[in-house]
Image (spheres, rainbow, N blue to C red):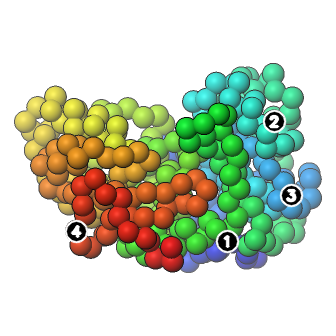
Amino acid sequence: MKPSGMNLIDRSGQFPDRGAIVSDGTEYTYGQLRDSAYRLACSLVAERGDLNGRPVAFLFAPSFDYVTVQWGIWMAGGMAVPLCDRHPVKVIRDIVQDCGTEWILTSASFSKQLKELKVQVLDPALMDEGVSVELPLVKKEGPALMLYTSGTTSKPKGVIISHDNLEAQVKTLVEAWCWSKEDSILNVLPMHHVHGIVNILCCALWSGACCTFLPKFDVREVFSQLSSGRYNLFMAVPTIYYQLIDQWKKADPTAKKKFSEVCARFRLMVSGSAALPEQILKEWESITGLRLLERYGMTEIGMALSNPYHGERRAGHVGQPLPGV
């Protein structure tokens, strides 16, 4: 397979046999991910030619299929517009109309609810995977993602993130938070925001690490997963930490002890996307022995500030400029 021009994807050739994604209990290697994305990209290019930065919306639950479609759009030269699997059709319609996409890639489980939209709905599982075509070289200055954010005002607005910008964000976080191919992370965040897409998924895949998705968020399942000993990294929003603390308080003494002992061995846990109340920081530290790392960023720029990986992490503070900021 020829280089795509996108370092995030091309680096996967360094560790083809390592586990990249765990989805619905199945582990998929980097080689399987790249091959699956390549076949989809060939199908897209065979039907439409070089997408040349055109927006392509896609709707999948967090999963191996989600990552395959995201990478496939990029390899075909397109701009990926992830839709939220929990949003009502009205919100999806507004985003689809605003971004100007001509079609949505989705699975059979979501296609019925999208029928009323005036765009073509395609299921990648039904596309011709037998074709092999020349894929375009990804332009570093070209658009990689369009993510919708509203902040505190009006309707969500589309923010375009270039491939250059995406790579800069990932390299900054990998350096600041000491990612390595030995890392394993549980991803329980929505996959239409920077937190889940960039901070977790892209950083993991850049590093040769493994990212595990759950079919849906359930605090009891997350508690069980974190107690399993399979992970050494976790990132979440303050409300999730609050729910996990509540779950720990409800657990029996054996489960409490196991959770605390296993979490104490994690090398890093991060809180973001909202201000972290000092009480949650203190309770989590008393349960796990770990002090959460708080950081600050925006959809428009990615992560900008972070408490240090090594050194003092101050309660109520979002840190100092990250490398390169």
Q: Earlier in the sequence, mark 4 or mark 1?
A: 1
Numbered disc 4: secondary structure: loop
Residue wearing tag 2: 97
Residue wearing tag 3: 51
Numbered disc 2: secondary structure: helix
In the image: residue 259, left or right of residue 129: left
Give coordinates of residue 93: x percent, y percent: 75, 30
In front: label 1 or label 3: 1
- Residue plotted at (70% across, 46% down): 158
The span from disc 1 to disc 2 (Cα, nearest Å) is 26 Å
Residue wearing tag 1: 164
Q: Earlier in the sequence, mark 1 or mark 3?
A: 3
The 10 Å Cα crowd at callout 3, few under 14, some 14 to 19, many 20 or more, is many
The 10 Å Cα crowd at callout 2, few under 14, some 14 to 19, many 20 or more, is few
Task: Identify residue type, mark 3.
Answer: Leu
- Residue plotted at (41% across, 45% down): 274
Residue wearing tag 4: 312
Q: Earlier in the sequence, mark 3 or mark 4?
A: 3
Whether residue 121 is visible, yes or no, is yes
* Quadrant showing the N terminus: bottom right
Task: Identify residue type, mark 1.
Answer: Asp
- Residue plotted at (92% across, 53% down): 48
In front: label 4 or label 2: 4
